Image: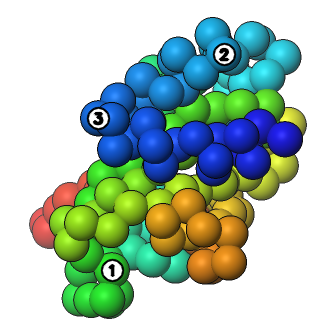
Amino acid sequence: MFRMFLRRHLNAWLWLGLGAVVIGSVLLGLTARPSQAAPAACTWTGRWLTDRGTMVLRQEGDVIDGTFVGGATYPEFPGGSLQGVIFEDHLLGAWTDTAGQVGGFDFVMVEPGSGVCDYFTGSWDIDFDAEQTAAWNGDLVKAAHFLPLVSR
C-alpha cells in the first residue's frame, strides 16, 4: 500500500524539487519506529556489489543516501545517486542517473533477523512505472576486501 502511494506521488514531488529524502521525512509524518526498521544489527551503510554495478550507501536513522556507478562492467548504467527511507523490512526510494533518468527502487535485506545483513534483493523501475522494472540485487563488500596487500 505504501509503495503504491509512494509511486503515485514521488514523481510529482521530485519535479517540485523536494527530493526523496525530504519525502521520506514529510510523507505522512513518517518516521521509522523501532518495530518498523531492520534490527539494530543491520545497517545499509557500506559498499555493495550489485547486478547493476557498485553502490555506496550511507544510513542515518531510517534515511539512506548513496551513489551508484555501472563502470566498465555495466557501461549501460551511468553513475547516479539514490535516496530512500526504511519502511518495515524494505528500503524504498528514488534514483537519478547522470543521463537525467529517474525511477524508484525497492530493496529487502535478506534474513535481517540473522544479524548477517550482507545481501539484499530488490527491483528498480524507470520513471516510477511498474511496467518497466528489473531486478537489482547486491552483496555487501566486506571491509577485508579493502585491506592493502603487504609484501615481505
Vertically, is 135 above or below 40? below
- Amino acid type shown at disc 1: Phe
Q: CA distance from mark 2 to mark 1?
A: 33 Å
Q: CA distance from mark 2 to mark 3?
A: 18 Å
Secondary element under disc 3, as helix, strand or loop, is loop
Q: Are marks 2 and 1 in contact (CB under 8 Å)?
A: no
Q: Nearer the viewer, mark 1 or mark 3?
A: 3
Secondary element under disc 1, as helix, strand or loop, is loop
Where's residue 40, x and y in %?
Answer: 69, 21
The disc, 1 or 3, on the residue closer to the chain's N-terminal end is 3
Q: Are marks 1 and 3 in contact (CB under 8 Å)?
A: no
Q: Is residue 99 visible?
A: yes
Q: How many marks?
A: 3
Q: Residues within 10 Å of mark 3 (few under 14, many from 20)?
A: few
Where's residue 33, x and y in %?
Answer: 74, 11
- Quarter where residue 2 is shown: top right
- Amino acid type shown at disc 2: Leu
Where's residue 107, x and y in %?
Answer: 66, 54
Q: Nearer the viewer, residue 140 or 80?
A: 80
**Pointer 2 residue:** 28
Q: Nearer the viewer, mark 2 or mark 1?
A: 2
- Quarter where residue 100 is shown: bottom left
**Mark sitting on residue 77:** 1
**Mark sitting on residue 17:** 3
Question: Is residue 142 found left or right of 107 in the rendered image?
Answer: left
